Amino acid sequence: EAQVTQNPRYLITVTGKKLTVTCSQNMNHEYMSWYRQDPGLGLRQIYYSMNVEVTDKGDVPEGYKVSRKEKRNFPLILESPSPNQTSLYFCASRGTVKNIQYFGAGTRLSVL
Amino acid sequence: GQSLEQPSEVTAVEGAIVQINCTYQTSGFYGLSWYQQHDGGAPTFLSYNALDGLEETGRFSSFLSRSDSYGYLLLQELQMKDSASYFCAVKGNTPLVFGKGTRLSVIA
């Protein structure tokens, strides 16, 4: 079954405590990305990756890091989380047929 | 850059037809997509148009006019379960960009 798996689904943390949200896909897609979703703002892209070791900033990259050491994994790192990073995060991977993007189930992050 | 405009909210009656419009600006164009997202869920792919015209998938259809930079999603025989947010997304020379979404409420 085609899947994008992200963990954890829910996370409550405190300001400044480093955290990582993992993302893995089993479709051998080259393209992966991270979004955050806030009420009224839609899906805003944080970072994307065109392939292994190739990453680039999206629209809202400040305060985030990513890495792409393997094709299937694309973790999102918050080195020093702040309350304004409280949001719903989605990882996604995209194939070449119809540019269909597959989303993970989402990670709801609260930074206190 | 790229930008998309779609209505923020639409309300329609069960069994009716509703159209959600999307206008876009992009440098380069490869296709316009539509995604559905239920509350608490992840966006899921609905349809894709790379060429002008209508694409039909069951009760859902999507239309594209590249010359007008315009597309729409048409939902027929509305059901209560169609209540969700709908996003248009455009693929140009940059990564896929999503609109802010249209919240569809289906009422009895």
Image (cartoon, rainbow, N blue to C red):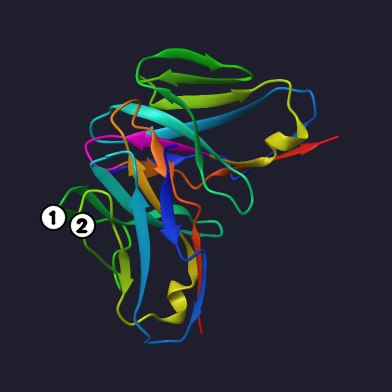
* Most foreground residue, B34 or B40: B40
Q: Is residue A102 above or below residue B57?
A: below
Would residue A73 be counted in the magenta stretch?
no
Q: Secondary structure at mark 1?
A: loop
Q: Which residues are magenta?
A: B87-95
Which quarter of the rendered picture does the C terminus of chain B lie within? top right
Res A99 quadrant in image: top left
- Which residue type carries mark 1? Glu
Q: Which residue: 69% across, 34% down? A: B82
Q: Position of residue A21 (x, y in %)?
A: 38, 66
Q: Position of residue A102 (x, y in %)?
A: 41, 41
Q: Position of residue B15 (x, y in %)?
A: 79, 23
Question: Residue beneath label 1, please?
Answer: A53
Dot 2 alpha-carbon crowd within 10 angstroms: few under 14, some 14 to 19, many 20 or more: some
* Most foreground residue, A71 or A83: A71
Which quarter of the rendered picture does the N terminus of chain B lie within? top left
Q: Is residue A67 above or below residue A101?
A: below
> Which chain letter goes with mark 1?
A
